[in-house]
Amino acid sequence: MTAKVIDGKAFAANVRAQVAEHVAKLKADKGITPGLAVVLVGEDPASKVYVKNKHASTIEVGMESFEHRLPAETSEADLLALIDRLNADPAVHGILVQLPLPKHLDSELVINRIDPAKDVDGFHISNVGLLGTGQKSMVPCTPLGCLMMLRDHHGSLAGMNAVVVGRSNIVGKPMAQLLLGDSCTVTIAHSRTKDLAEVCKRADILVAAVGRPEMITGDMVKPGATVIDVGINRIERDGKAKLVGDVHYDSAAAVAGAITPVPGGVGPMTIACLLANTLTACCRANGLAEPKGLTA
């Protein structure tokens, strides 16, 4: 068996195209332009690249992009004051504070200062609680992207056994909640799970989000299972830097029915879903119908 490759790059391009279509219609019919504000504190190289990509993608789909680049020594009071201004700005429908923040800043305090309705990362404690109780919320971008790809591949997920390896607040836990919402039977496993291989082999859907390079190998995959690899790990192999996932791709692809590659799988979906969340937040703020197929 050779697994079908789930092309996240192509899927994300389709999501961005759908967002752009909705944005153009909002502008033409309602005179409304969704706006995304991104706040970057400091000079973290990876964060600067992410912010640059988010800005370009926001402009590409016809949204307003508001960038706020602050020096690393910015005080907590000044950062919170900026968030308060963005919360009050009707042109801003989504607010994202790029993580990680400098060590003197309290990330939880900062995230929870964002208006939950504008929290397009889905990290605010109110959105976490709403998602956990099955209510309408802003959903974290990476798990939302995974869910979209799974729905596209399978149609209905009802009754499927799903195993999520990883228990982070950003991916593992919300992913499990989303799968429960689609009527899967869900197990959350992690690096300390006993008999992890046996737990994984029961999964019709296996989501790897544990942050360990190539931890999930082919002998841990149920034949025909769908494998979603959220991991992005930089390793050195044969003297060269390489990006790999949390799944050993070659051995898993020989067993699975479908699999996401790294790179080019889940990664491109994260920014696409950030744009989708901004569009959703804009529609909700204006009492308009949410875009179909772009929400949980």
Image (tube, rainbow, N blue to C red):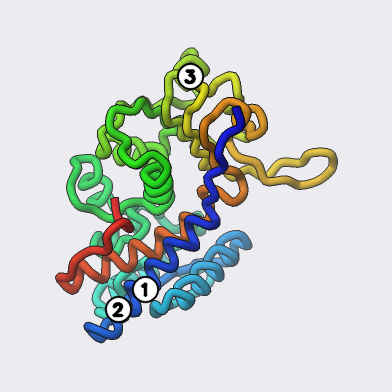
Residue 96 percent across, percent down from the top left: 39, 64
The kind of secondary structure element at disc 2 is helix
Q: Residue furthest right?
A: 239
> For residue 201, which numbered disc appears in the image?
3
Callout 2: 10 Å neighbours few (<14), some, many (20+)?
Answer: some
Residue drawn at the location 62% of the way across and 28% of the way down = 254
The kind of secondary structure element at disc 1 is helix
The kind of secondary structure element at disc 3 is loop
**Is 244 placed left or right of 200 in the picture?**
right
Callout 1: 10 Å neighbours few (<14), some, many (20+)?
Answer: few
**Mark 2 to mark 1 CA distance (whole Å):** 6 Å
Which residue in the protein does label 2 denote? 25
Q: Is residue 93 above or below residue 177?
A: below
> For residue 21, which numbered disc appears in the image?
1
Residue 75 appears in the rendering: yes
Residue drawn at the location 23% of the way across and 63% of the way down = 290
Residue 119 percent across, percent down from the top left: 31, 61
